[in-house]
Amino acid sequence: MDEEILQLATRIIREANVNGVPADEQMRLFFKRNPGFIRERSGDISRAIYTFYRWSGFANPKDSLPAKVRFANNRAAEYVKNPSTFSLKALKHAVPRWLEREMELTYEWLSAIQVDPVIWLRARKGEAEGLRERMRIQSEPIERFPEAIAYDGTQDLYRHADQRAGNFQIQDISSQIVSHLCDPKPGATWWDACAGEGGKTLHLSDLMANKGLIWATDRSKRRLAHFKKRAAKAKAFNVRLREWDGSANLPTKTQFDGVLVDAPCSGVGTWQRKPHARWTTTANDVKELADVQEKLLSNVARSVKRGGKLVYAVCTLTQKETTAVADAFAKRFPEFEPLEMRAMTEGGDPAAQLTILPHHFRGNGMFVAAWRRRNESDLQD
């Protein structure tokens, strides 16, 4: 690492600490104020910062911040050359100590989150082959997910003509898999209850061939405003946007064929892509978010029509936010029966609860559970 990159990376990390904002947000502010770096050194600066957060747990806490940044980047280079020399015990330094009480720390998971993540694109249906040719993408297609493309180029994707035309979205493959697991049918009615900026909603719309109706709700006006622009660009005309705060006061009395609860969570599954979050997330966050997740599922349950689906998804792997939430819901709502989803990994069996890990598809960690609301005749049997 050269001296200029070291100094700039240290400066941004220090400013993020002082301002109490995530490192990626501080980087955006820095590049906005210094646009010349975007073309020249932004990639090197970003890589140095993210590498620091992946490997800072191995550094001497008494060292200066510049020394820690240099140490972390040197340690990352060692790992790339000789990953087998890092034991499970050693790799546990890459995450906060409280995490081992919340989930099993495996060598496969820890080693996967210590390398740079893959950038995934989702092509609009029918556009994948042409997109690969125009963008000169060399990565191999995934047979089960033909629209998922591992991007291996260096172009600015946000300025690309195909992105402006809505021909692809930047969307992690695990997020794409959630929509496939929902398996929405054209003409159906769905509700994406925690839609955020709409990545999964737009995919649901694509899978439904832009037919039927999708309600998309979120508590944030800002996110919904951004989503509205994305939906227009993607030509998703079957989406209806509404604010909803997650309470029992539902945004509509509509009964849906399917409801997706992509709930707010601790984000442990995204720690490869967002390594800075490892050191700001706490065990208390996990507990509080698990309570929120249980309430969200309870509140939307009555909006699922008889015979309809309820899908719960979180990009985390902690037991409190995954199997515990799903099991608690199943006990409280016996009118919902487990609904097996198709297996996502080679050799895997269909199941009503699935965990997608980074080393499965080189994407985020994700947990998904699904139920079917029993028909009246089922309840009488």
Image (cartoon, rainbow, N blue to C red):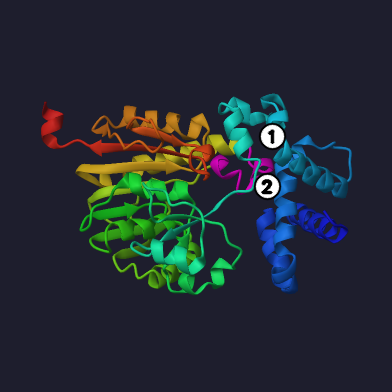
> Is residue 281 on the magenta stretch?
yes
Magenta stretch: give its range.
266-282
In this view, the residue in front, 305 or 124, is 124
- Estimate the x, y position of residue 372 in percent, counting from the top left: 25, 38
Q: Quadrant of the C terminus?
A: top left
Q: Please tell me whether residue 338 belongs to the stretch shown in magenta.
A: no
The quarter holding residue 104 reads top right
Mark 1 Cα shell of 10 Å, populated few (<14), some (14-19), many (≥20)? few
Give the CA distance from mark 2 to mark 1: 22 Å
Q: Are marks 2 and 1 in contact (CB under 8 Å)?
A: no
* Residue pointed to by mark 1: 83
Residue 100's spot in the image, x, y percent? 62, 27
Up/down of 163 relative to 174, above or below: below
**Secondary-structure class at tag 1:** helix
58, 315: nearer the viewer: 58
Question: Residue 276, which numbered label?
Answer: 2
| Chain-order first, disc 2 or disc 1 | 1
